[in-house]
Image: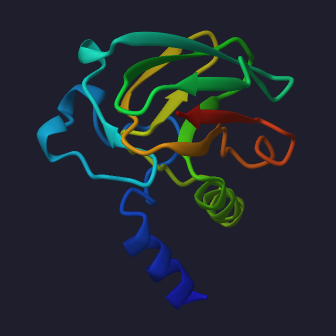
Amino acid sequence: MRRLLLAALFAYPTLGLAHGEKAQSPHAIDYSKAEQTPFGTAADPKTATRTIRIDMTDAMRFTPSGIMVKRGEVVRFIAANKGQVLHEMVLGTLDELKKHAELMKKFPGMEHDEPYMAHVDPGETGEIGWRFTQAGTFHFACLIPGHFEAGMIGKLVVK
């Protein structure tokens, strides 16, 4: 068990922070050094060519639940929590989101603060700036334990 916890700490460096605590401000991101992921790279939301608002509810749903973007497009996502509990929007591949959701079940208080996520308190909004560099089908989900399993997932198609 100790090895599993240590492995998780190294795999997820912000594991020791609880939800609600911020590892970094979104303004602290150095976009020139943004990591390339299978679904794109972090981008300054100020450079976005389009803004998409995603509402999150306690019915464990996103609205809209499906989005289409163009390859190369920079999108500014505004994630609005319309519910009474913490929600989040996390971009990724379906496999990555499933694995991360399982890890969240094992470590429910872990913080996972990356540029492709927004943790949003009730009644608040969060922001993600993203450049979609790869065509394909990707997803966004809330990985708070129980939310993903209840169907809080959306589809993102990059053409």
Identify whether 46 is placed above or below 43. Answer: above
Is residue 140 left or right of 62 when viewed as pictured? left
Please state which of residues 61 and 36 is positioned toward the viewer in this rendering: 36
Identify whether 51 is placed above or below 139. Answer: above
Please state which of residues 121 and 26 is positioned toward the viewer in this rendering: 26
Query: For the point 45% across and 60% down, which residue is it?
Result: 15
Identify whether 78 is placed above or below 66. Answer: above
Query: For the point 38% across and 53% down, which residue is it?
Result: 37
The residue at the far front in this view is 159
Can see residue 30? no
Can see residue 47? yes
Query: For the point 39% across and 45% down, which residue is it?
Result: 114
Q: Quadrant of residue 1?
A: bottom right
Please state which of residues 132 and 60 is positioned toward the viewer in this rendering: 132
Is residue 82 left or right of 34 when viewed as pictured? right
Query: For the point 32% across and 15% down, which residue is it?
Result: 48
Identify whether 44 is placed above or below 125. Answer: below
Is residue 133 left or right of 156 when viewed as pictured? left
Q: Position of residue 56 (x, y in %)?
A: 70, 20
